[in-house]
Each structure stands twice: as structure tokens, then as C-alpha cells.
Amino acid sequence: MTRYTTIPEIDRVYALQQRSKALFKQTTANERIAKLKALSAVIDEYDFAIKEAIYKDFRKSHTETEVTEIMAIQMAIKETITKLPKWMRDKPVKRVWKLFNVKPYLHYEPKGNTLIITPWNYPFNLPMAHLISSVAAGNTAIVKLTEHTPHINQVLRKIIGAVFPETQVFVVEGEVAETSHLLGLRFDHIHFTGSPAVGKIVMKAASEHLADITLELGGKSPAIIDKNVNLQQVVRNLIWGKFVNAGQTCIAPDYALVDVALKDDIERVFQEELKHAFGEDPQQSADFARIINAAHFERLTDALRQAQVSGARLIAGGRSDAAENYIEPTVLTDVAASDSLMQDEIFGPIFPLVYYHDIGDALQLIEEKEKPLALYIFSKSDGFIDYVLAHTTAGGTCINDTLIHLMHPGLPFGGVNNSGIGQSLGKFGFKAFSHERAVADVTIQPMSKLFWFPYGEKTQKILR
Ligand code: NAD
């Protein structure tokens, strides 16, 4: 049984971090880089322990953990180490003629005490990614881990404890009670990753102290498939994006809108490519993860059953095994628009295909839902791609592939309204955890020399 962090422990460390924030605010780029290098080395040391822990939590393969959890974080650390001195540097702003005596620039300062709340689906990557941004920006951080991944939580606690004193970074384990207690405290910035429903709770709590927030949420991310595509490649890209982590990825394609001209071919190609990917019996595949817990297993299998009762037709998959929280990679069609599979974020290995005759109808279906976190476009036609971009919105978009927009260090990651507020990762994460302070350095003469009482002819001349 996991021991949750007690409320007195939280209060004790919170008070320590309140006092120590001034100290970390003064740290130089080199001091922060030294901590990130140490973090990278300790992650290397714990490489096997991380993979084993995540395997125990939801049978994710070592290779998938390597790619989606560890490699992503080591890349983020490397990028931050290389770019941090540049990110921290004051940024000059263009001078303007009317204010010729003002040298304007932006100065980056840490926000102070930060709270990072994370979900279970990438239980190493997500706490680490946002922690890197927070400490790079010079903050203290309390990192609230999810309650659903006890094994990796223990490893995270050790890694973080080996690098950071608790006055700088502290790990909290717990559920609603512990998170609610944290949300009652005053933080300078709260970074939340999780569901839109809990995001609303976080935003309300943050408003009590007018804390800055970043909300990384979820929702239904569509993939739109034009008839003008390399079908085998598209299906492979969709299979990877959808079934990595058993579909428990915030930016996984949730459902696909497919040109009806592809109907017969795409169903056949899905059947063939799923066999190539996971074999005749995906339960035996070493590369296919399990559903995180029995509650989510029940939610998904109920939704699948309900869709079939209302007339959905299976294209591939459909089997499950409660003893292992296993759900086969499943593709289906003819799902009723009112079914939960088409209403709620699926967050599991079930993929509805919806055929469209007219792209306008497909885009209308997206428009009727909340703004998605990701939107995928597959087409060889620039005209089609431009049309879809112009008539939709999404936190991010990937054209002719899935997920990789998240990995590019030059692109911000985030949602829009219901799928999120603010941006994370790389320099955008650094900025989210920094206050961008506006500085006007008056170099020649103060404004009061130009505009001085009583306003007379001299002032009028300047205004002309
Ligand atoms: P969740 O919202 O249930 O939980 C997230 C965190 O909030 C956990 O630490 C949990 O302990 C805490 N929490 C849960 N209920 C709470 C409450 N009532 N009050 C206060 N705290 C509470 O999310 P989840 O089920 O862990 O993760 C799945 C969701 O996260 C999906 O919607 C997914 O799309 C989203 N997600 C988004 C991103 C992103 O970067 N945008 C990444 C991963 C997951």
C-alpha cells in the first residue's frame, strides 16, 4: 500500500519553499544547468528501475518506455542545458521614435513557488518535463504525482531526492484530499495536466489567489483522412499514434473521419496492419500495454459494449481480458453520434472510423465538439490541408503523421480552451514558469523633462 504524503508534511515543506524561493531566484544559468546535468545522470543510473516500475504499473514495454518516457526527457534536458543561457538573457525590444529616450527590454524572472500536478498516463515523462521547465526558470516546485502508478512514483521520489533538496523540489503522493489541500495554498504558478473536469477545479482554486496557471488538458482529437493518400502509410501512422501506450495518450487520435471512397480499402488495410504490428493475438505481444486499472477497463469495455448494442460494426479487435486489464486494439465503425465513444475522450485502444461524403460535414462534426488538443490531417493535396487548417482549430496539428508535433523542440505544446490554456515544453515551458518582466530603461532624459507642468508650447510641439 502506497503511503500518501501527510498534510503536516505538505505544510512543512510548503513553508520551507516559501522561504527558499528568494535563494533559487538568484541562481545563475550555470547553477541551474549543473542541477539538470545531475538529473540526467541520475536518470541514467535508474534507467532499468524506471522501465521495470512502469512495466509493473501497466505492462508498458521497456522499449516504449525508453522512447516515450526516458528519451523524451533526456532530449528535453539536453535542449534546456544548451539553450538556457539564451532563454534567460534579457531580450531587447525595438525602440520607438516618440519614446527615443527609452531602451525597452524583457527580463525573465522566476515566478517563485510552483505546483505541478500530473496524471498517470506518462507517469515519468509528464512530472519530469514540467519539473525541468520549472527549475530551469529558477523556481521551487511541489510535484503532485498521480495515485495510480505507485511503482514509478517510488522511483521518481528517489531520483528527485537524489538531485534536489526539499527546499527546492518536493514530491507529493496522494489523491483528491492531498491535491485539494495543495490547491488551497498560495502558489505563484500552478501547472496542471489532466482532465478538463479537474482542470476546472484547478482554475477555480487558482483564482482564489490569482495564481498563474497552465492547464494541459485532453479531449477528442480527430484525424481527417482525405481520399488522396498513401493508405498503408496513413494506417500505420494511425496505428502507432492510437495504440502506443494502449491509446492512453492525451494527443492520441481519438476517432478518424475518413473519405467514404476509402471505405473498403481502409478496413482491409487496418486488419492487415494490425496483424503486422501485434500478431494474431495482440495479448501475446510484448509491445502492447495494458489499461491502467480496473475502473478504466470497465469504462472502456462498457463503452464498447454499448456502441455495439446501438449498431456499431467491428472492423478489428474487440476482445478483452479483465484479469489483465487487457483490451485488444479495436477499430470499429457505425458508432452512433450519441454513444459515449463519440461523445467523451476515449483514452484507450478503441478507434471509431466515421465515413464522410463531404468534407464540410466532417468539419461540422468537429466544430460541434469542444476544441481539440490535437488534429491530424492526412492528404497529398495542399489545397485539402489548407482548407482543413482554415476551417478548424486545435492546440496543435500534425500533417501526414501523428504525435510528433509534441516532440519538436521548436513548437509549443498546449491546448485551446477546453483542451488547455497556456503552452509548455522547451522555451515555451521556460516562459510559462517565468515572469516576462517589462523594463523601460530611460537612457537620456526622463519623460518629466519633456512633459512637465504647466503643459505649454514645448509639450504641444512634441505631440505634433
Ligand atoms: P485527472 O484529471 O483525473 O487527474 C489528474 C491529477 O488531478 C491527478 O494527480 C489526480 O490525483 C488529481 N485529481 C483528480 N481528481 C481531482 C479532484 N477532484 N480534485 C483535485 N485533484 C484531483 O486525469 P487522469 O485521469 O490522471 O489523466 C487523464 C487525462 O489527462 C485525460 O483527459 C488526458 O487527455 C489528460 N492528459 C493531458 C495531457 C496534456 O499534456 N494535455 C497529458 C496527459 C494526459
Image: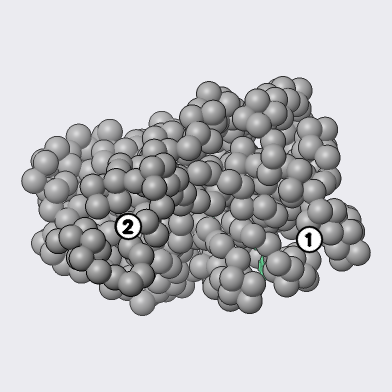
N-terminal label among 2 and 1: 1
Tell me if the residue at label 2 has its CB under 8 Å from ligand 1: no
Task: Between residue 98 and residue 49, name the one nearer to us.
Answer: 98
Instruction: From the image, tell me which residue sits under label 2.
Output: 450
Return the x and y of residue 43 as percentages of the image width and height.
71, 28
Mark 2 crowd level (few <14, some 14–19, many ≥20, 10 Å Cα): few
Q: How far across and how far down the image is residue 184, in percent?
A: 73, 72
- Residue in front for this viewpoint, 115 or 220: 115
Looking at the picture, tell me which residue is in the foreground, 235 or 86: 86
Residue under pointer 1: 174
Q: Provide residue 368's location: percent of width, then percent of height.
A: 28, 73
Query: Can residue 21 be seen by looking at this rendering?
Result: yes
Q: Is residue 396 left or right of residue 246?
A: left
Q: In which quadrant of the rendered view does residue 72 lie?
A: top right
Q: Check disc 1 and report its element: helix, strand or loop.
A: loop
276 left or right of 382 in image: right
Amino acid on which disc 2 is placed: Leu
Query: Looking at the image, is mark 2 or mark 1 nearer the viewer?
Result: 2
